Amino acid sequence: MLPGVYLGKKKNGDVYYRSSFTYNNKHISLGSYDTEESAFKAYLDAMKLTKTKELTINNDFSQFTLPFSKIVSIINFRDNGLYMKTPIYVRQNYFVYFLSPTLDLKFDLDDLFYYSTRTISVRKGHYFVADYGMQVTITSRYGIKNHAVKGRDYVFANGDETDFRYANIIVINQYYGVSKCIHRKRDAYHVKIHLKGNYSIGYYEEEIKAAIAYNKAVDAARDAGIKKIFPINFIDEITNRQYAQIYSQIQLPTKYVHALQEYTKK
């Protein structure tokens, strides 16, 4: 066999070729290939990366057999002494996660361990990772709910939508049914719930109180027999007793109460 190439067999008996090499006392798998020649080419690519400092993650690697994700891992290991299986390159004070040669995401170093063990996937413009057997959006790490709308519920401070460093993520609306707005020339939180149309539950100066008002509107809808599945706001910042006290003080709008009564009569 050619250097760095090892013969393998699938369960059905088909032959394939594995490629690997050792760099800085670490044995690194380079993947599986259909031919011995392509596996050897991947081995030569890896050797070239370790010996040629002029090759950086900004180079054109279209002629390489080695997958781009593996190229990033090897270059990062060469430059920073850290080998990670995910396509991460560490820069000063932050790191870059490469989804492709032309798309990368920036994160704080605090998240390095998390993303070194998780693969980011893209679906309909949203980024996901597998976490404890579930597909979760990476925005959930910032307290952003799945229903959140970019530009309305959260924004990127510097306008770069690939920059997921904590200082760049500004959460505007973190609760269901609650949106921050200007009401009577002052900041307020507007609460709305959708039945067959949108109903305003009111304006509140405090975001937590607004979130509880939404929950109370949901409870009233359920009590009226409405079968629609409403999300509920989970609020960790206050005790159960404080929650109950705020809940009892909230008065739902008459228009909304009448709408529920009409629904009950049907």
Image (spheres, rainbow, N blue to C red):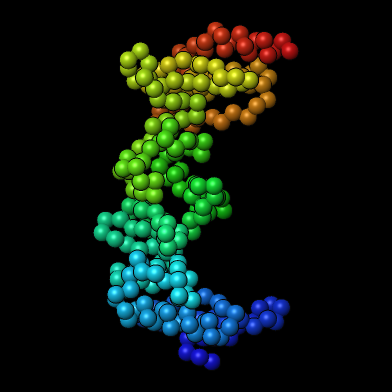
Q: How many marks?
A: 0
- Judged left or right of residue 203, residue 214 is right
Which residue occupies the extreme right position in the image?
266
Question: Residue at coordinates 55% horizontally, 22% vertically from top-left?
Answer: 193
Farthest bottom residue in view:
1
Q: Which residue lies at the image location 43% right of the left edge and 32% below the top edge? A: 152
Residue sitting nearer the eye, 176 or 248: 176
Q: Is residue 99 visible?
A: yes
**With respect to residue 127, does 42 lie above or below?**
below
Give coordinates of residue 173: x percent, y percent. Answer: 42, 30
Image quadrant assignment for residue 243: top left
Asked if 157 appears above or below 193 in the picture, the reply is below
The residue at 68%/19% (across/down) is 225
> Horizontal placement of 127 versus 195: left or right?
left
Q: Position of residue 216 (x, y in %)?
A: 53, 20
Out of 179 and 236, give the one closest to the viewer.
Answer: 179
Horizontal and vertical percent for residue 180?
40, 25
Observer able to see residue 241: no
The residue at the point 36 percent across, 77 percent down is: 49
Location of the N terminus by quadrant is: bottom right
Does 207 appear above or below 124? above
Q: In the image, is 230 to the left or to the right of 171?
A: right
Q: Position of residue 24 (x, y in %)?
A: 34, 80
Query: Which corner quadrant of the image does residue 222 belong to?
Result: top right
Image quadrant where residue 79 sits: bottom left
**Quadrant (top left/top right/bottom left/bottom right) for the C terminus:** top right
